């Protein structure tokens, strides 16, 4: 059983099948989310104008190489995205519930 390579690519990032998808792919994923779920924040459920809704990483980077994967991205309003920051998803939701928000 062979282990994956830990060599670094020329841009000094670990090699990974899920490495940064690039701007075009992120825009396509954002469009897909908007088409399928509408312009609604995944955290608070607020309808947000298409021009101001943002993509948020459900699980923050913190040492992960696969954080830009489409299954780690959701639409979030600016307020929730800023409040969540680098907080893990479960902690953020627990904080919101404990505050009654």
Image (cartoon, grey):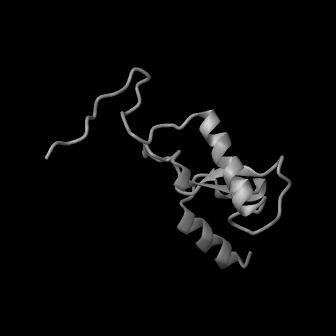
Residue at 39% from the left image edge and 40% from the top image edge: 17
| Vertical placement of residue 71 versus 92, above or below | above
Counting from the top left corner in percent of width and height, residue 98 is at 65, 78
- Classify residue 36 by image quadrant: bottom right
Q: Is residue 82 left or right of residue 52?
A: left
Residue at 45% from the left image edge and 46% from the top image edge: 66
- Classify residue 97 by image quadrant: bottom right
**Identity of the residue furthest to the left in this view:** 1
Residue toward you, 60 or 55: 55
Residue toward you, 32 or 22: 32
| Vertical placement of residue 36 versus 19, above or below | below
**Identity of the residue furthest to the top in this view:** 10
Residue at 54% from the left image edge and 68% from the top image edge: 90
Residue at 47% from the left image edge and 47% from the top image edge: 62
Counting from the top left corner in percent of width and height, residue 50 is at 82, 51
| Vertical placement of residue 82 versus 100, above or below | above
**Identity of the residue furthest to the right in this view:** 49
Q: Quadrant of the C terminus?
A: bottom right
Counting from the top left corner in percent of width and height, residue 88 is at 53, 60
Give the total of numbered labels: 0
| Vertical placement of residue 64 versus 84, above or below | above
Q: Is residue 69 left or right of residue 26?
A: left
Counting from the top left corner in percent of width and height, residue 83 is at 69, 58
Residue toward you, 85 or 8: 8
């Amino acid at each position: 059983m062979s282990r994956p390579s830990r060599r670094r690519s020329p841009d000094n990032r670990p090699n990974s099948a899920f490495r940064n998808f690039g701007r075009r792919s992120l825009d396509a994923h954002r469009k897909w989310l908007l088409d399928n779920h509408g312009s609604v924040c995944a955290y608070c459920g607020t309808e947000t104008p298409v021009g101001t809704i943002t993509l948020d990483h459900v699980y923050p980077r913190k040492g992960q190489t696969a954080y830009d994967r489409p299954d780690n991205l959701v639409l979030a309003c600016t307020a929730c995205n800023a409040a969540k920051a680098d907080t893990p998803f479960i902690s953020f939701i627990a904080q919101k519930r404990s505050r009654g928000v």
